[in-house]
Amino acid sequence: MTKQTIRLLIPQWQGGNNPNYSFGAELLAWLAPDNDQPLIHVPVQAYDGTPLENENGTYGRKQLLEQLEAAQHIIYAHKPDRIVMFGGDCLVEQAPFAYLNERYAVELGLVWIDAHSDLVRIVGYDYGHTLPLGNLLGEGDEEFAKHVKVPLKPENVFIAGLEAPTEQDTEMIQRLGIKTAGTQELMNSMDSIKNWIKQNNIKHLAIHLDLDVLDPKAFRSLLFANPEVPYDFSAAGTMQFPQLIQLMKELSEEADVVGLGITEHMPWDAIHLKKLLGEIPILSK
């Protein structure tokens, strides 16, 4: 029986309070290989120049909740077997992965490939994209977490590529017993993920890929690589393209991949070129 796979384009930017995430998502969807998987556009409120309001500790809370519900409605209307997501900020993963966890229950594992845990709120950084994994586990932000009907079991989550976890990250990871592996460990061996899959009898995988797991010196289309703003690279990813490709291929061999989300694409060169083209009079008339 043929399994139904849908692609979701979710150009959400409010979770990171950066309108450039929308363009990054659209470009991801355009770059992806063509096939017969339908591409469905999840409605997202476009940036109109109005600053987001900080509502109860999260910028753009109202818009984010509305977009979360819109994604849920689309997913439940289609009832797909597999979902591919092109985002947008990391919070776009919540609705698709919550659905897949309902569908595949204890046989679903989630591999969170990310330089950051996305488990806990960062003090002084009131953005929704810091909490999607926490929400999926039934923790995180209470208002978002209540949209997860069946929270993920911590033992069915593996964080890969984690760099410089905060004290709060470490506390929650240890409290919940979540398995993790840094980039250096994975470069030496992927046995930790393979053993986790076998030990937990995981048959299906959902994979979150935050592109910021990549080394910004090797891949410049990342928030950390903004040529106009100096960033502290201590929390940036260190994974290289060959290593990431190998990881994705080996995961696909170990279990049935039913979900893939790719997020946080920030193509600075294309963003600046698009702005330049918009300023050229003959092109705007």
Image (cartoon, grey):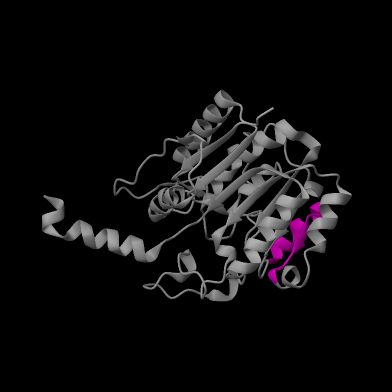
Question: Horizontally, is 28 left or right of 48 in the view?
Answer: right
Instruction: Locate the N terminus by quadrant.
Output: top right
**Highlighted magenta segment, given as a residue range:** 166-183
Q: Is residue 21 above or below residue 116?
A: above
Q: Where residue 115 sits: x, y (%)?
A: 62, 64
Q: Where residue 132 sits: x, y (%)?
A: 61, 48
Q: Is residue 243 visible?
A: yes
Instruction: Name the residue nearer the viewer: 108 or 228.
Output: 108
Question: Horizontally, is 1 left or right of 234 in the view?
Answer: right
Q: Where residue 193 sits: x, y (%)?
A: 79, 58
Residue, x 66% and y 49% (percent of image)? 207
Instruction: Name the residue nearer the viewer: 85 or 57.
Output: 85
Question: Horizontally, is 9 left or right of 195 in the view?
Answer: left
Residue 160, quarter of picture: bottom right
Q: Is residue 179 magenta?
A: yes
Q: Is residue 129 above or below residue 152?
A: below
Instruction: Name the residue nearer the viewer: 42 or 65.
Output: 42
Residue 92, quarter of picture: top right
Q: Is residue 143 visible?
A: no
Q: Where residue 170 sits: x, y (%)?
A: 74, 63
Q: Is residue 227 above or below residue 112?
A: below
Q: Is residue 239 magenta?
A: no
Q: Which secondary structure class fits the magenta region best?
A: helix
Residue, x 47% and y 57% (percent of image)? 265
Q: Residue furthest right?
A: 199
Q: Is residue 12 above or below residue 242?
A: above
Count of numbered tags:
0
Instruction: Name the residue nearer the viewer: 160 or 30.
Output: 30
Residue, x 51% and y 53% (percent of image)? 127
